[in-house]
Amino acid sequence: MKTSYFSLSAPIIKENFRRFWALPAIAFLTYLISGIIPILANYRHGRGLALFINPLLNQAYPIYKILSLLVPVIAASLVFRYLYSRSSATIMHALPFTRSRLFNSNLLSGLLFSVLPVLLTGLILLALAKPVHFGKAASYTDEMGSINENAILSHINVFSHNMVLCWIGQTLLAVLCVYVISVFAAVISGSGIIQFFAAIGFNFLGTAFMTTLTYYFSTFLFGYVTGEKLQELITSLSPFTGLTNQMIVKPSPPLVIAYLAGSLALVVLSSVLYHKRRLERTKKAFVFRGMDTAICYLLTFFGMTLAGLVLFSDQNAKWITYAGFIGGGLVSFILGRMVVKKTLYVFSLPALKCFAAYAAIAIIFLCVLIFDLTGYTDRVPDVSQVSKVAVDDSTLRNSDARFDPSYYRDGSKMALEIYRSPENIQAIAKLHQAIISNYADKKTPESGGVVFGLHYYRDGADLERSYVVDEDFFRDSSAYKKVYESHEYKDLYRAGNLKKLGKGELSVYSSFNYSDIEIRENEREEFLKCLDADFLDRTYEEQLNKKRPCGSVYLSFKNLIPGSGYTVDGINLNLLDSDTHTLQWLSQHKSLRSLQPTADDVKEIQVYACDPAKKDQALDELNMLEPKYSSYFKKTATLTDKKQIQTVLDTCETNPDVFICEITFKQNKVFDGETIAFYYGQDSAPSFLEGLAK
């Protein structure tokens, strides 16, 4: 008589519930104590409830995440535990049930153990759901002056029935996927301990394996970067990480369908393997041939990587990393072999052949990366196929806060500059090629450096790279100069393009004292036009000049942070001596006295200097100590000559270096006896300071 593959046995399911009822009961109590009770405790406190319920319903609550992982793993281990004892397996399979019925009944039992606590918790959450918001403002525009995404987010109901239903669905899917993977581990394992750890490992295998590969790529491929899309793909390879990391992966219908289809396929595979499983192989770690070798290779790969990561060294001592790979691979193979063979006697000819095969694969893999046999590092796209390019450029951002694209209307939230003009795309590709040529040894700067990332959007596959480059590299770059002075670049960073030009503060602060020049509401438009005119006229050389700005223009605005209320944020735009339009406007409507002090305003200048050979140590110490307490910086001169003082006022720099000039101002109508520190490098210091640094 032909038996259906979908047959079930009610007595088996009832027996499983009689024996293992404690698992779903304990799981439900944990859901109740860690989630429901805190919700009831904060039920009348809207903000406190919002802060708790928001991560809980968005798969970011740690206790619920742990339950979603451990409960299905333990459930699979319990319902199939009879497979790990030859006598129990013999008795179970001697019962008047087919293997299909045994497998299906135990499969359903464990699934019910896993999903019932989630369903019961979900029903309670549905009963408790009510409107809960982060903010209390009556409308999106209250106190803000304009609609923005934070204002909208603050008004979202974080405890709606729809949110609870989404949580139920996502949690059930996560539990289902984890359970199915755990059942597969149970079918191929030969003991309960092996099954538990195999189930945990298999649930993270896809993401862990690809993350490990990206470590190799970033180590050996110059310019490699894991882009957002690839990071999302890697995270979603394992259903548990894909469904519980919503900051990286947003659940979508295709992803849900893929997880359901994968779960169904794995159930079918587990059923087939269950029918082929030999009862006499229960004493082995894995009951199917080939699995022990595959698991041993995986353990060796992860162990080799871990040892290389611990012993990672820079380009000048790569042999240490290679020694880590060799030693880690050998030790991990021996330990892995002991685990999968369940014996200490692993030194044999078959083991040697097995290790030789792995070593050959590992050597080929590393050689492809080390010698860049794929041509990855030298690849620059054909600009004719590029529609736009996104640039992560911190070259100027470190010295001028203006250059943060996230503050501007046309800028990316991820602080990326987007270029679409063919001229800029071509210039950036030229700059990209120059980076590859100038860093042919693929070494990052020994000290400092700036991040320069690229994302080419083109027909076919996109191309992404990220480099750490010396700041001096950009100073002499004609391609970078062309991009900076382009209309597209200037239009992005003009003050009039800021996202939040509301009713916040608009003031000019001097570089020499703590007073400010307030720009009134009726003056804002005219002042910002002058500011933009100067920026449009500014040359690349003027921007890179290390000389101190005469001041900064500060624009503040309110920013709504869900759960924290309104905070004040702002941006400083450097005001240079070459910004003639703005300075002329200030001269006519305000005063330039605080922005352009003279030697008559200065009492004295204390000069400190350090040995240029010890500059790095001296600057590190300067972050914690004032110059007069420094063991590296020594007081070398006190300037009182007006001509020398005026030279310092006109040429001093803002970046800490071997010379520190502490300027002490007199007390008058503009200055109040402040002491302000500026700096000089060894090459930029005035002649009267030469010879003091030693």
Image (cartoon, rainbow, N blue to C red):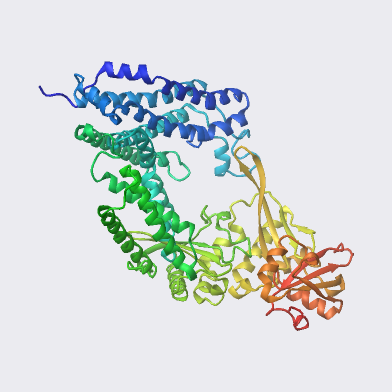
Relative placement, left or right, of 246 versus 654 is: left
Q: Quadrant of residue 362?
A: bottom left
On the question of residue 130 being in view, the answer is no
Counting the numbered discs, the total is: 0
The picture places residue 98, in percent across and down from the top left corner, at: 18, 24
Residue sitting farthest toward the left: 1
On the question of residue 671 being in view, the answer is yes
Relative placement, left or right, of 313 versus 567 is: left
Relative placement, left or right, of 94 versus 692 is: left
Whether 280 is drawn above or below 517: the answer is above
The picture places residue 558, in percent across and down from the top left corner, at: 66, 46
**Considering the image in quadrants, where does the N terminus appear?**
top left
**Considering the image in quadrants, where does the C terminus appear?**
bottom right
Viewer-proximal residue, 159 or 329?
329
Whether 293 is drawn above or below 673: the answer is above
The picture places residue 383, in percent across and down from the top left corner, at: 38, 68
Whether 299 is drawn above or below 618: the answer is above
Whether 483 is drawn above or below 8: the answer is below
Viewer-proximal residue, 158 or 517?
158
Viewer-proximal residue, 267 or 467?
267
The picture places residue 663, in percent across and down from the top left corner, at: 81, 69
Identified at 80% across, 59% down, the residue is: 515
Q: Quadrant of residue 377?
A: bottom left
Viewer-proximal residue, 398 or 106?
106
Q: Quadrant of residue 193?
A: top left
